[in-house]
Amino acid sequence: MIETGRFLIKQISVFSENRPGRLAAIAKALEEENINILAFSIAEADGFGVVRTLVDKPKKAYEKLTGLGFNVAFTDVIAVQMRDAPGGLYEIAKMLGDGQINIEYSYAYSGKEGAVLILRVDNADQAVRLISSRGATLLESRVFQ
Amino acid sequence: MFWNEKIETLKKRDIEALQLKRLKRTVAQVQNVEFYRKKLQEAGIRPGEIKTIDDIRRVPFTKKQDLRDGYPFGFFAVPLSKVVRIHTTSGTTGKPTVVGYTKNDLETWAELIARNLTMVGLKAGDVFQNMVNYGMFTGGLGFHYGAEKIGLTVIPSATGNTKRQIEMIQDFGVTAIHCTPSYAMHLAEVAEEMHAGLPTLKTGLFGAEPWSDSMRKELERRLGVTAYDSYGLSELFGPGVAFECRERNGLHIWHDCYLVEIIDPVTGEVVADGERGELVVTPLAKEAMPLLRYRTGDITMKLEDDCLCGRARKIARITGRSDDMLVIRGINVFPSQIEHVLLKIPEVGNQFMVYVDRINHLDEMTIEVEINRSYFSGELQDLARIQKKVVKELRDALELRTTVRLVEPGTLPRFEGKAKRVVDRRGEA
């Protein structure tokens, strides 16, 4: 049995009103603490949104943003390495689909680890086991944090 | 406990006799005011013609605008040399309304505050922090002199610097506070942020704006006080006109000093006891500025039940103002109803703002409310669920579809004086 905990990465989720300057305020705060943003996305609903970021120092980011009055929560996500070539996303997405893993949301980046798919799934433990058993590479949280 | 037991427990017949005597005197006094001389003449009423209390119904109403038109001293019935104090109302637009007091007026006013404070159980030995504006607003000095009169240890802390206010409550062992309910809520928030306990507090007197019973529960839980509603308006001296007793089931209005009518705000007709309408008051013990049938704009009703405390008949707590009342797509909405709904939803805060617009000839009401910090899971769908819940609860209570905007915690304005939570933009386009 594979120990799944080390693959759970702490994403910072920040509640934000949908108005100019909010992202800048968040980014500035992180800069001030010398926190690097590895990946991020914005999800928006009716008048508000959630800024999701993967940072190198999540605890520090949480404290800084909370101290400034932001409403912040940690969310566990996992990161899967993809082939940085046509068909790379398809391989991973098909694997998850075949394994009946439902994706709540996802975003991706291409960096020194190659192409990486960040996933929020309903059952992270199950997803980690499935992805490992099918031979794909999961990135451990220590790669980022 | 009574401050003036004889007057406070007068039998109905004795009160009415006293009221009639004082009403006659008031009608005579207003002859010194040109506005009333004309008004009464036009209505064909000679001062001597007031024979019963009900004769008051022949007298035309006095409106807030009349007082504004009389700026500055047009409603004074005594020479300025007899006026020892001037206050102005917290006026919204244009010139403020000026109110004046003779020495006797200040004495009467302090007497009423003394009755109220004694009624809720305060006495010498209590330490009283008066956290309202001490300037032109009547709330500061009004309470101050009444509180000194009954021997409380008074801290005239006025408004602002909430952290300092909390430190004083702690350091001076304050047992009773007076402020607006919205400031009390802010005080509770700041105390919680500071992790400051307020163990000596036991009594909270809240007034100057309408507040709901759910807000009472919230304030009592968070501040550890028993909360009492205080009612007054500058035109009738200021605070102290009516107050809750320990039964906390309606406001005792002081019948020896105020003649009460409840009218339909649209037709001006007097409504039946137990029916809601606008409070109209004829003060019976004012010298500098007597008024006849003053339209307060506040919505209440006469309660029919006697009170266990032995004092005279009460009026209901104020549920709104006839001029705060919003008519949205033909439905009457009071901001207090919105507050009531929000207080029942733990996922959102208690502060709110209401914006009313007219879009495609339709009234649209938008309510901004803060998300409660501890209910943020990080998931968008949970936020959307909270938003839907607020919309639904508001629709159930108001019978009205509204737009709800979730905003970040701590971003909505906090009000220290009277809260201005409604922005009606329908006239702008």
Image: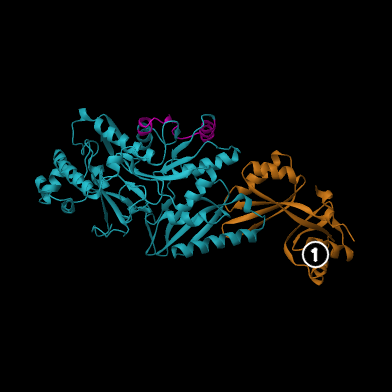
B353 left or right, relative to A44 = left
Q: Is residue B96 visible?
A: no
* Residue A24 belongs to the span the image colors magenta: no
Quadrant of image for the C terminus of chain B: bottom left
Decide which of B127, A143 is in the foreground and name it. B127
Asked which secondary structure carries label 1, the reply is helix
Chain under label 1?
A
Q: Which residue is mark 1?
A: A89
Q: In the rendered image of this protein, which colour is used for chain B? A: cyan
A106 left or right, relative to B28 = right
**Callout 1 amino acid:** Leu
Q: Is residue A39 visible?
A: yes
Classify residue A62 by image quadrant: top right
- Find residue B51 and report its horizontal and vertical position in percent: 12, 49
Label total for image: 1
- What's the image's color scheme? by chain
- Find residue A59 and report its horizontal and vertical position in percent: 74, 44
Classify residue B116 by image quadrant: top left
B259 left or right, relative to A44 = left
**Range of residues picked out in magenta:** B146-170
Residue at figure coordinates x 64%, y 61% from the top left: B381
Outermost residue toward the bottom in this view = A98
- Find residue B213 and report its horizontal and vertical position in percent: 45, 52
Q: In the rendered image of this protein, which colour is used for chain A? A: orange
- Find residue A117 and report its horizontal and vertical position in percent: 79, 59
